[in-house]
């Protein structure tokens, strides 16, 4: 499997980022003075109450939303518009209903004008890696929710982006499928070396996947605290769940977020 290119320096940099949305009737401060540096190869998970600006933070990095003030960089270059060096996975897989799984994955290649042979090889590697083999031609409605998200993940990884942004990608899945997807994503992250930023409402998911957990406050979103996750890089789901270090961190996070926001 091709690994994301190793890069020195900062993968994502945010300094004093504030985002205000204005309409004729109201003004919302979604992010307030957010500063965060993410190193290449990190897996940063972001938790916080609903509406605190988590999705906005990802969109800022992707260049889809412009900060009202502050600086954002991706791979040490200032973000001035939509970024190509990223993959983005949303809560809904957003697949084309009339295309099979493999053709949906290859959409990424078509949009980017990638070399067809190389893209096809990469698609097959990813299909293998995510357990989609045998379902290449299946249409989205013939796939389970978990499989649809696997297709979306493969599509986001097709061009081997150095940075992968994920906005509650497993929020709509049942608990068991979600655990499986967590374990798979963790393995894919280890194998590819991609820098990942994942937004989640699940404390368990944040701790299991993260090398660092960022906790945000209710709107206007600020970073309350970041926690380094003191768990081995190689993680087994069942083992992690019974690890006292997991329990301690999950308890700390729950305390910070308050029971209303916790969805463990
Ligand atoms: N394009 C927009 N125009 C106006 N307001 C917006 C826009 N995008 C987001 N907001 C507002 O900014 C705030 C933060 O939204 P955002 O979607 O980033 O929060 P979130 O933490 O991801 O929420 P959730 O956890 O519920 O998905 C919300 O109050 C939202 O209504």
Image (cartoon, rainbow, N blue to C red):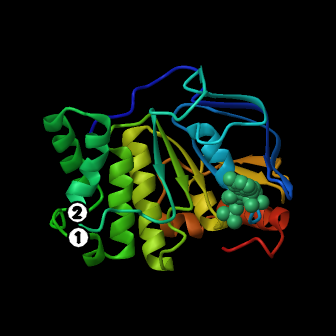
Residue 136's spot in the image, x, y percent? 17, 62
Q: Is mark 1 within 8 Å of ligand 1?
A: no
Q: Is mark 2 within 8 Å of ligand 1?
A: no
* Image quadrant occupied by the C terminus: bottom right
Residue 248's spot in the image, x, y percent? 74, 63
Q: Residue at x 31, y 41 (%)?
A: 111
Ligand 1's quadrant is: bottom right
Residue 89's spot in the image, x, y percent? 47, 54
225 or 119: nearer the viewer: 119
Q: Which mark is residue 99?
A: 2
Circle 1 residues within 10 Å: few <14, some 14–19, many ≥20: some
Q: Is residue 226 left or right of residue 134?
A: right
Residue position marked by numbered label 1 in the rendering: 139
Say which quarter of the image contains residue 245.
bottom right
Q: Is residue 188 above or below residue 114?
A: below
* Image quadrant occupied by the N terminus: top left
Q: Which mark is residue 238?
A: none
> Can residue 47 be seen by looking at this rendering?
no
Circle 2 residues within 10 Å: few <14, some 14–19, many ≥20: some
Q: Of helix, strand and loop, which one carries label 2?
A: loop
In contact (CB < 8 Å): disc 2 and disc 1: yes
Q: Residue at x 21, y 39 (%)?
A: 119
């Amino acid at each position: 499997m091709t690994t994301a290119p190793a890069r020195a320096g900062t993968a994502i940099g945010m300094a004093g980022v504030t985002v205000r949305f204005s309409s004729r009737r109201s003004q919302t401060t979604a992010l307030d003075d957010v500063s965060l540096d993410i190193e290449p190869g990190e897996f940063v998970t972001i938790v916080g109450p609903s509406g605190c600006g988590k999705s906005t933070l990802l969109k800022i990095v992707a260049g889809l939303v412009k900060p009202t003030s502050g600086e954002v960089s991706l791979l040490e270059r200032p973000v001035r518009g939509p970024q190509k060096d990223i993959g983005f996975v949303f809560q809904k897989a957003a697949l084309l209903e009339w295309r099979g799984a493999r053709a949906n994955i290859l959409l990424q290649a078509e949009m980017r004008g990638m070399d067809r042979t190389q893209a096809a090889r990469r698609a097959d590697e990813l299909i293998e890696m995510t357990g989609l083999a045998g379902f290449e031609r299946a249409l989205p409605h013939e796939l389970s929710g978990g499989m649809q998200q696997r297709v979306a993940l493969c599509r986001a990884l097709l061009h081997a982006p150095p940075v992968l942004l994920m906005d509650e990608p497993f929020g709509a899945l049942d608990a068991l499928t979600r655990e499986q997807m967590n374990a798979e994503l963790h393995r894919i992250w280890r194998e590819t070396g991609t820098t990942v930023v994942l937004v989640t409402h699940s404390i368990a998911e944040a701790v299991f996947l993260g090398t660092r957990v960022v906790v945000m406050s209710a709107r206007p979103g600020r970073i309350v605290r970041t926690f380094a996750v003191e768990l081995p890089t190689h993680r087994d789901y069942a083992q992690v769940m019974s690890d006292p270090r997991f329990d301690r961190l999950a308890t700390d996070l729950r305390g910070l977020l308050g029971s209303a926001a916790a969805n463990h």
